[in-house]
Image: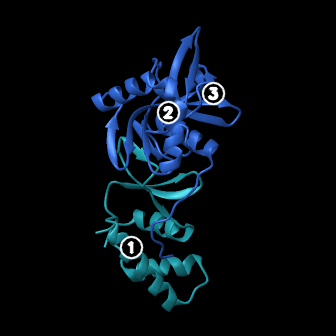
Amino acid sequence: MKEASRTIHINNHLLMQEITRMFNEQNKESVTFIVRGYSMRPFLEDRRDKVVLAAPRVPVIGDVVLARVGKEQYALHRVIKIENGIYTMQGDGNPTYMTETFTEECIIGIAKAFIRKGRTVNTNSAIWRSYSFTWRMLKPFRRIILGVCRRIM
Amino acid sequence: MKIKEGFELQNVCGEHIIVPAGEGNMDFSHIISLNPTAAYLWEKLAENDEFSINDMARLLLDEYEVEEEIAIEDCKLIAERWKEMGLVE
């Protein structure tokens, strides 16, 4: 019965349902969880960083959205294109040809802040905006930079 | 001792977790999870005001086949943990 801190791995699909329940039934303003995967490198690191998610709203380009992109498949990526109600998103850390699409009803939530190395960065902060701008400008060099990240991280 | 106000036991993703009531943010990265036995005790103890280690042990004995001494020792441990975590006062 005596148990210290431990990590519970929650199945993604189950977590998404709980997040939706938190927003819809419990009226939570935000939900925080640890990110998995490397697709939002160099900013977010697998199992180190967290995201603070707000309830679904209409996204704009540049928003980092958690959405269902397939049957029980989810992604937390940046919106790069909106066309006829179809949203295209892409992970910062993914090769430029890898994108996902979703529609509004597939949105689980929208990032309002990230907790990177324990430090909170709001998505409306100057830091996040300048990072986003820089990363967009560096698009042609993405592969090289991510290659370096992989080696040093 | 008694359970502090403002905490509620919820079932999230199949885990019994203690969440601060009325908190605007649900933090999945930092939750207090109880095992089924502890959750049972919590539920019962939340119903009454003050409780002692003996009250806790009695609840355990009602529900589980366990020796009284062991039940008391276990309850002391849980109560200690709950105090450390600021759940009871």
Say which quadrant the C terminus of chain B sits in.
bottom left
Say which quadrant the N terminus of chain B sits in.
bottom left
Label 1, on which residue?
A: B81
Image position of A45 with respect to B84: above or below = above
Which amino acid type is shown beneath numbered disc 1?
Arg
Select label 1 or label 2 by which is in front: 1
Q: What is the distance, in whole Å, between disc 1 and disc 2 at their CAs?
A: 33 Å
In x, y percent, where is residue B75? Answer: 44, 80
Image position of A77 with respect to A117: above or below = above
Which amino acid type is shown beneath numbered disc 2?
Asn
Given the current orientation, which residue lies at the most extreme right position? A71
Which amino acid type is shown beneath numbered disc 3?
Met
Label 2, on which residue?
A: A24
**What colour do you see for chain B?**
cyan
Q: Are marks 2 and 3 on the same chain?
A: yes
Label 3, on which residue?
A: A98
